[in-house]
Image (tube, helix red, strand yellow):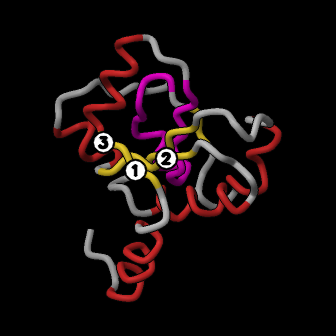
């Protein structure tokens, strides 16, 4: 997907303030059995096409509205992902503004996850 120049400028500025991780680290942590919330911030139709194992869905359009009902602990470890790592950066900044202290964005998103050959779940 080709992103607009202004969108990329916003993401770049926010990336300087948001912690990031990568797909290999997230997968390794899953395999170790580490406990953290894995949150897919993509649109409903993207979620329906497949998502990371163990993920919950809080789309970018509703995450700020719904996060406190799903993850009330502002100190909980939360890993956000999207298609490639841009929308999750934006969502991570907003959660930090809301007082969430342990939020990271997964660089590469589901695209990087899939390219690495890691499993994708489908709800039937």
Residue 6 lies in quadrant = bottom left
**In this rendering, is residue 20 above or below 70?**
below
Residue 78 lies in quadrant = top right
The magenta-colored residue range is 36-54
Q: Secondary structure at mark 2?
A: strand
Task: From the viewer's side, name the closer residue of 86 and 61.
Answer: 86
Q: Residue at x 26, y 75 (%)?
A: 2
Residue at mark 2: 104
Tell me, for residue 22, which label it has, or none. 3
Label 3 vs label 1: CA separation? 7 Å
Q: Residue at x 77, y 48 (%)?
A: 66
User: Quadrant location of the N terminus?
Assistant: bottom left
> Mark 3 Cα within 10 Å, few/some/many (few <14, many 20+)?
some
Label 3 vs label 2: CA separation? 10 Å
Q: Residue at x 45, y 50 (%)?
A: 105
Left or right: residue 99 compared with residue 43: right
Label 1 vs label 2: CA separation? 5 Å
Q: Are marks 3 and 2 in contact (CB under 8 Å)?
A: no
Q: Are marks 3 and 1 in contact (CB under 8 Å)?
A: yes
Residue at mark 1: 20
């Amino acid at each position: 997907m080709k992103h607009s120049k202004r969108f990329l400028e916003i993401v770049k500025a926010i990336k300087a303030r948001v912690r990031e991780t990568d797909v290999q680290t997230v997968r390794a942590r899953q395999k170790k059995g580490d406990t953290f919330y894995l949150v897919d911030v993509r649109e409903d139709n993207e979620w329906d096409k497949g998502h990371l194992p163990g993920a919950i869905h809080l789309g970018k359009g509703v995450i700020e509205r719904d996060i406190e009902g799903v993850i009330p602990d502002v100190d909980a470890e939360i890993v956000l992902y999207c298609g490639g790592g841009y929308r999750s950066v934006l969502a991570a900044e907003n959660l930090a503004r809301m007082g969430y202290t342990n939020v990271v964005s997964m660089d590469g998103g589901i695209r990087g996850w899939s390219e690495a050959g890691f499993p994708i779940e489908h709800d039937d």
